[in-house]
Image (cartoon, rainbow, N blue to C red):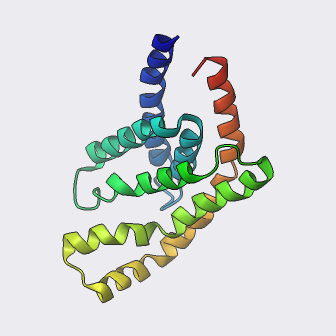
């Protein structure tokens, strides 16, 4: 049984990392609109700590495809923050509450994306506090779009996570 679980994880988790990457590319024409945050929350609810595997496969694929440049570094922590917040949510959240909380958390991550991104940019470019605030302000419209789209996609978190958990139980994961 243990070997079966390990094999399924070795197969599924990297595939989910590739799915994150492909989903981002599929929505490339729409700036800051993509299902990555929603999928990360789904994977975290279904796989808990193991969700870090697809997250970091996604981050590495993203860097390998687009280049490991200064804008890539925030990816090392920005998705882990969403994972950590999702991990802090109660495991047995009632569906009525989860249907509201999951999209809210997903949306909040989108609204705060530029703010979460700012510390790394401040360190890399030597921004002072005012410059950092100006940098955050200049991306505010993108963050609003990101947050709204994350809320919309976040509506899929509960049904997809329930489906994935149910399938995992069938397969003994």
Q: Is residue 110 above or below residue 21?
A: below
Instruction: State left or right for residue 95 relative to residue 141.
Output: right
Residue 17 location (% of width, % of height):
43, 36
- The residue lying toward the viewer, choosing from 73 and 97, is 97
Which picture quadrant has residue 73? bottom left
Residue, x 43% and y 76% (percent of image)?
139
- The residue lying toward the viewer, choosing from 161 and 32, is 161
Residue 1 location (% of width, % of height):
53, 10
- The residue lying toward the viewer, choosing from 138 and 28, is 138
Quarter of the image where the C terminus is located: top right
Instruction: State left or right for residue 78 relative to residue 48.
Output: left
Residue, x 53% and y 69% (percent of image)?
111
Residue, x 52% and y 52% (percent of image)?
37
Instruction: State left or right for residue 22 relative to residue 162.
Output: left
Q: Is residue 172 above or below residue 111?
A: above
Residue 146 location (% of width, % of height):
54, 64
Q: Is residue 41 above or below residue 164?
A: below
Residue reaching furthest to the bottom: 130
- The residue lying toward the viewer, choosing from 106 and 28, is 106
Residue reaching furthest to the right: 96
Residue, x 56% and y 68% (percent of image)?
145
Instruction: State left or right for residue 25 relative to residue 153.
Output: left
Residue 113 location (% of width, % of height):
46, 66
Q: How many marks?
A: 0
Which picture quadrant has residue 64? top left
Say if residue 14 shows up in the picture.
Answer: yes
Say if residue 146 shows up in the picture.
Answer: no
């Amino acid at each position: 049984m243990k070997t079966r679980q390990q094999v399924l994880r070795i197969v599924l988790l990297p595939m989910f990392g590739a799915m994150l990457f492909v989903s981002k590319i599929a929505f490339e024409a729409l700036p800051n609109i993509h299902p990555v945050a929603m999928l990360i929350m789904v994977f975290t609810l279904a796989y808990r700590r193991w969700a870090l595997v697809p997250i970091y496969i996604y981050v590495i694929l993203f860097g390998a495809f687009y280049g490991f440049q200064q804008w890539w570094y925030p990816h090392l922590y920005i998705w882990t923050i969403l994972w950590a917040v999702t991990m802090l949510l109660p495991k047995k959240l009632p569906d009525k509450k989860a249907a509201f909380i999951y999209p809210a958390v997903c949306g909040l991550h989108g609204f705060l994306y530029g703010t979460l991104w700012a510390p790394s940019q401040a360190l890399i470019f030597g921004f002072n506090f005012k410059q950092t605030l100006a940098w955050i302000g200049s991306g505010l419209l993108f963050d609003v779009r990101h947050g709204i789209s994350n809320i919309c996609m976040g509506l899929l978190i509960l049904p997809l996570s329930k489906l994935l958990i149910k399938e995992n139980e069938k397969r003994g994961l």
